[in-house]
Image: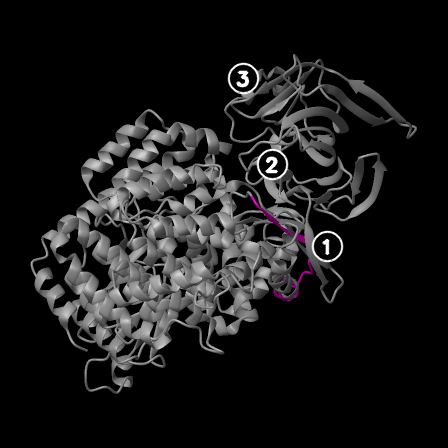
Amino acid sequence: MAEQNQSYSQFRGQPRLPKFAIPKRYDLKLKPDLAACKFAGAVQISVDVVSDTKFLVLNAAELSCFHFCLGIYLSSIEINCIDENDEIDKWVLEPVRVDLFEEDEILVLEFKESLPIGVGVLSLGFEGTLNDRMKGFYRSTYEHNGEKKNMAVTQFEPADARRCFPCWDEPACKATFKITLEVPSDLLALSNMPITEEKQNGNLKTVYYQESPIMSTYLVAVVVGLFDYVEDNTPDGINVKVYCQVGKASQGKFALEVAVKTLGLYKEYFAVPYSLPKLDMIAIPDFAAGAMENYGLVTYRETALLYDEKHSAAANKQRVATVVAHELAHQWFGNLVTMEWWTHLWLNEGFATWVSYLAADSLFPEWKIWTQFLDECTEGLRLDGLAESHPIEVDINHASEIDEIFDAISYRKGASVIRMLQSYLGPGSFQTGLASYVKKYACSNAKTEDLWSALEEESGEPVNKLMNSWTKQVGYPVVSVKLKDQRLEFDQSRFLFTGSHGDGQWVVPITLCCGSYDASKSFLLQNKSETLDVKDLLSASGSSDRPWIKVNVEQTGFYRVKYDEDLSAGLRNAIERKYLSTCDRNGILDDYYSLSMSCEQSMTSLLALMSAYREEPEYIVLSNLISVASKVAKIVADSSPELVGDVKLFFINLFQNSAERLGWDPKPGESHLDSMLRGELLTALASFGHKATLEEANKRFRIFLEDRNSPVLHPDLRRAVYVAVMQGVNKSNRSGYDSLLKIYRETDLSQEKTRILGSLGTCQDPEIIQEFLDFLLSSEVRSQDVVFGLSVSSESREIAWNWLKAKWDHLTKTYGAGFLITRFISAIVSPFSSYEKAAEAEEFFSSRMKPYIARTLKQSIERVHINAAWVKSIRNDKNLPHAVKELAYRKY
């Protein structure tokens, strides 16, 4: 057959492994050496040969001991054959040739003759390095009794199991795993399944685990080190443990409580119980992502799992709850039902992001978490408004391209279109369709279309047609709305921050209300333009004035709305009179800000809209207002520096009332949202230079330095105070900087460390920033945390850019391929606002291009172009100087 004539070259450069053999079971033994940072292993893979072939092709990377000292000392493939008398014959086939193609990360075995159809056992031995790149089988460091120690950890998503053992490293190649570890006797060894037996052998022990259910290689997990833990059981008897560094066990209690409740909640929501006998969650000191959903052994950054009653802020508590809920959603959506290929990554991530809000809302209704969902939507809209965005479903041709799609499109746009669909279908029908999907594809793989079919069957709605326009094409629409003769005219075109209108047409679920939330309508906008008669709504509103009309009610749709001048004025008035819901007030602000950035609305009209929020009470709207204000202040500084003082004064006036209402100290029984808001408001006032805030912050900081247990610096205030302190730091007055570094060095709480790193970069003195950036690359900062210090003040952008260029080779060596390296580019290149700087960045990276940074670099350069065009448009806004003066000195 054709397989017989295949040459090795046929397997090179292929996005997928050939399908002539399928793994069924792995018997994997690993022996990590934590002192030498190496590991050895052996794997026996039960392989089902399903079509005629002389080759076996599987993944392997960065493993040694293959033939001629490279490779895996390969024993053989053992074939069991049953003859007519039911006797089992065994024979061993030796490969005639073994090659490892490092660039393709594949191992090719050639046999003399065709392999018999049926199941054989492939036995391989191998060795590797416990690397320091936070991928594959790697080492993390921690301190125990003042001594630095190594732990061994796995991180296999998306395609790094191949760095630990040879395997069919694709999500569709599901198999069962029987794992055995040989480790030092005094250490804890964890894997996906419970331990069945431990055998001591001097200072080593061999740990045997139950065989796992069928799962993908990227979900296999092993952790070896010293840990404390807290534990509890669910009502159905599933044992849940939270592991962390010795001495931090009490910080795991909150996550444990959330996990136990969430497992019960998901069991009900998906109508399928959690499928493993135990769930371990563990905080890893060095961890590139936020967390990873390995089946039964979920790994986390410390900041995403541990909560310290005394030193963690309310925002940290919320993050722990949503990250735990996200990872546990994957135990069903991802682990039990797995995407067929990385093109469908968004199904995993978008869904888990959306459902984590469902869980958090159920556990903590007082957090009003759905009002905060707009943050997810906004981030998705921000990235997808770039010409260099990508569709939700993106073709992946090589493993090196996968990392770049772990982004706001897969997670946040994914979550937003799922919410839009749930809102359109209704929660009941959506949940039933989802439960039938999980049941049907449990222990198997599924594609996006499989989910649509299940939901379509349940709801009777054209889900496939509706959703294809959102997942298969890039971008989203801006819907322009005009009111003419009691008819609303709708036009859709692709929204781009560049201001041009791109191609594309969507099936848009339009919702609208008129003068009241009771007078509402909804329809599917399927053409470029449509009109809708709203005579009945206008008369139902009963208002003598022209009533306000809000499109995209509660912001459940993933699109922007651009209103004509009259409708805009009506909405401004409705915001001032508090007629609109929290989500709608927030959505109008975000759409307006984005239309200003794309030069479709003037800066003058954006500032006029912002002034309508001067009595805004809600956390999420004020939080967004702060974010918009800080970006506006920066772009005005680049375009019209003479206006910056008055713009900042306007923003101080805008936020002062809310800050005074909350005060500096927590009030007994105050809401979680007020706790989060206090810190954000004070941080904003400090960065805009509000004198009273800066003075109070510095006063409290001095008291705190004398007594770290003083109540004057509640965790919710710390970032604000640290930022305020850094505003006064310069090379001749550096005590605040040195004091913060001292706190950084003395704390062992990751949340405090990252809080300090995020504050130090706000210093306005470029010399201090130069010193700080060099500190980021010292051994005192874990590689995973460097990214928290990259957002520097506008005054230091040039320093950061020169530093990035000087350190680029060092950075690529440290981080290798992976998404952390892309954060350096987006954080340091994107904030510029001149065409010259865009050209300079292009020039610098032209000789340093790698597939894993290509998309991020294009997006960052596009952002610089967008900022440059925005600067030009602000300079041409003749009404702006007068408007800014009036807003800054207006007495409310």
User: Dot 2 corresponds to which residue?
Assistant: 139
> 10 Å neighbourhood of mark 1: few (<14), some, or many (≥20)?
some
Question: Is residue 242 rendered to the left or right of residue 83?
Answer: left
The numbered disc on residue 102 is: none
Residue 765 lies, in percent from the top left, at: 26, 46
Q: Which residues are magenta?
A: 264-285
Which residue is drawn at the image coordinates 71% and 59% (left, top)?
231
Q: Earlier in the sequence, mark 2 or mark 1?
A: 2
The picture places residue 776, in percent across and down from the top left corner, at 42, 40
Q: Secondary structure at mark 1?
A: strand
SS at mark 2? strand
In this rendering, the label closer to the viewer, 3 or 2: 2
For the residue pair 305 and 826, the one nearer the viewer reads as 305
**Relative horizontal placement of residue 369, taking residue 486 as reference (left or right):** right
Q: Quadrant of residue 865?
A: top left
Q: Amino acid at mark 3?
A: Ser
- To which residue does mark 1 refer? 278
